[in-house]
């Protein structure tokens, strides 16, 4: 008789009170054995070495030994309502093994979390092989776990056996670049990957190249990529930028805490924001070595960008007023109406260290915050209108005279649309007087416009007459030639 058959034979007669002495554990075993999905308490199993009351929705189990864990695993294997399993703090492998034997029969769990566990040997990934094959694991989350080279290799093999992984988080695991290459390569088996979090590891150039290869694969759909606190340098950025330029799935990117990337690397990264393929909405680069030149490069790349809404630059000491001014200037170039119209109307948050940045800029900082607030409006054409009205008190009509007499109805219609827009608080647009001023400019410029239009028309008539005379001349010469 194998182990499962032994549990099957006793399942109807065993008393929960005989399995564990812990009252909370007994409640949990009853719930799992009952196999009911009528409330959220029955969807999560949380196993750790002490009881926690911080989350009442966690089914919080504290192991007493191999016996109670064997029965817990057996009931979990029979349960089809559990969705999430958490292992918290180191639990002796001899205690986990009987639990995992039963767990391998479960087919409902789709999210697996590890916290503060030594996984460097990788035995647990081998033991859970059948569980990974049976279940459609969508999310694997590991935080503050020890994962050595062998652990990373076995984890990569396990990931290759998953059916439908969508999120992988390996946070503060300090995994070496070699191990990350194996793990990243294994992700090519999962076309539905949406989120990859490698915060706090040792990603270097080879890992960046592997990541670049993964993203080049047409089947990947990674939308969130967290590479904070790794060991990326300019060479790593060089490997990532070409694929970032053409990868239109990425929406959120974290590259904080990378002081080994120089200004050259950051300037190269800025170029991805100028790409028409960019769909990036958030870019986080706090505590990095970005300087004024790199800030200016980001400002330049963002001029025509219509996707990025958040740029995070906390704790950066190398950006001075010059760099912050460049970032503020991209929001509203007041050199001309056309430049204002073509300014960035998408960026909604540029966050840095207020004490050392925008507050120090006094009025510029205030203007900057007002423009960011204005960019949060949904209709971007209205944002452009408001900026033009706010920063161009007297709209010069001369540049528009190339449209000749068509400009007047277009200008009147523009002001009428502007009059229906809700203006920022405490701002008086004075649309009526400004419309009259523009009409006056048009009327005052009409004589010159009329003369220019008339002379252009006469020139066209002269050209037409000359062509007609040339045609008559050729006809006469042809008749003379035939005689």
Image: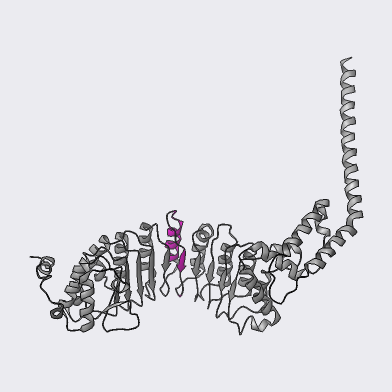
Q: Residue 470, how many percent across, how many down? A: 88, 30
Q: In the depicted view, which residue is nearer to us: 273 or 130?
A: 130
Position of the N terminus by quadrant: bottom left
In the shown orientation, is residue 97 left or right of residue 220?
Answer: left
Q: Residue 340, how many percent across, how many down? A: 72, 65
Q: Residue 400, how many percent across, how many down? A: 80, 56
Q: Quadrant of residue 219?
A: bottom left
In the shown orientation, is residue 290 left or right of residue 119?
Answer: right
Residue at 36%, 57% in the rendered image = 189
Q: In the depicted view, which residue is nearer to us: 280 or 413?
A: 413
Q: Quadrant of residue 159?
A: bottom left
In the shown orientation, is residue 467 left or right of residue 359?
Answer: right
Q: Quadrant of residue 8?
A: bottom left
Query: Which residues, given as a range, are shown in magenta?
Result: 206-229
Residue at the farthest top position: 483
Q: Is residue 334 above or below residue 52?
A: above
Q: Was residue 290 drawn as part of the magenta stretch in this picture?
A: no
């Amino acid at each position: 008789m194998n182990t499962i058959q032994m549990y099957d034979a006793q399942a109807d007669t065993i008393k929960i009170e005989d399995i564990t002495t812990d009252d909370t554990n007994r409640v949990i075993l009853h719930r799992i054995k009952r196999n009911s999905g009528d409330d959220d308490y029955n969807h999560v199993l949380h196993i750790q070495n002490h009881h926690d009351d911080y989350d009442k929705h966690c089914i919080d189990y504290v192991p007493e030994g191999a016996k109670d864990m064997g029965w817990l695993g057996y009931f979990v294997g029979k349960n089809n309502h559990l969705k999430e399993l958490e292992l918290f703090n180191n639990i002796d492998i001899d205690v986990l093994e009987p639990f995992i034997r039963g767990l391998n029969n479960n087919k409902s769990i789709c999210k697996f979390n590890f916290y503060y566990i030594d996984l460097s040997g990788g035995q647990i990934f081998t033991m859970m092989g059948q569980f990974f094959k049976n279940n459609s694991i969508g999310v694997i989350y590991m935080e503050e776990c020890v994962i050595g080279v062998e652990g990373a290799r076995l984890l990569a093999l396990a990931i290759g056996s998953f059916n439908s992984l969508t999120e992988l988080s390996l946070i503060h695991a300090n995994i070496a670049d070699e191990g990350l290459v194996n793990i990243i390569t294994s992700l090519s088996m999962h076309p539905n990957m949406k989120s990859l979090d490698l915060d706090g590891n040792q990603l270097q150039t080879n890992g960046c190249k592997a990541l670049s290869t993964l993203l080049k694969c047409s089947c990947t759909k990674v939308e969130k990529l967290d590479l904070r606190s790794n060991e990326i340098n300019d060479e790593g950025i060089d490997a990532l930028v070409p694929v970032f330029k053409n990868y239109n799935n990425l929406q959120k990117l974290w590259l904080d805490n990378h002081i080994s990337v120089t200004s050259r690397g950051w300037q190269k990264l800025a170029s991805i924001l100028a790409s028409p393929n960019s769909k990036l909405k958030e870019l986080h680069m706090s505590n990095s070595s970005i300087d004024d030149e790199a800030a200016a490069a980001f400002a330049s790349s963002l001029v025509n960008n219509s996707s990025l809404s958040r740029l995070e630059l906390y704790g950066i000491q190398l950006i001075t007023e010059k760099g912050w001014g460049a970032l503020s200037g991209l929001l509203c170039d007041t050199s001309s109406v056309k430049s204002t119209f073509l300014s960035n109307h998408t960026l909604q948050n540029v966050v840095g260290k207020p004490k050392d940045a925008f507050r120090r800029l006094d009025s510029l900082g205030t203007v900057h915050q007002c423009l960011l607030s204005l960019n949060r409006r949904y209709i971007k054409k209205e944002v452009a209108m408001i900026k033009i009205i706010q920063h161009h008190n007297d709209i010069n009509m001369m540049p528009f005279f190339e449209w000749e007499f068509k400009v007047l109805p277009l200008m009147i219609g523009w002001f009428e649309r502007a009059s229906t827009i809700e203006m920022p608080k405490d701002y008086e647009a004075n649309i009526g007087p400004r419309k009259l001023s523009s009409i006056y400019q048009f009327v005052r410029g009409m004589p010159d416009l009329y003369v220019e239009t008339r002379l252009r028309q006469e020139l066209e008539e002269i050209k037409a007459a000359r062509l007609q005379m040339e045609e008559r001349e050729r006809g006469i010469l042809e008749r003379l030639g035939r005689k």
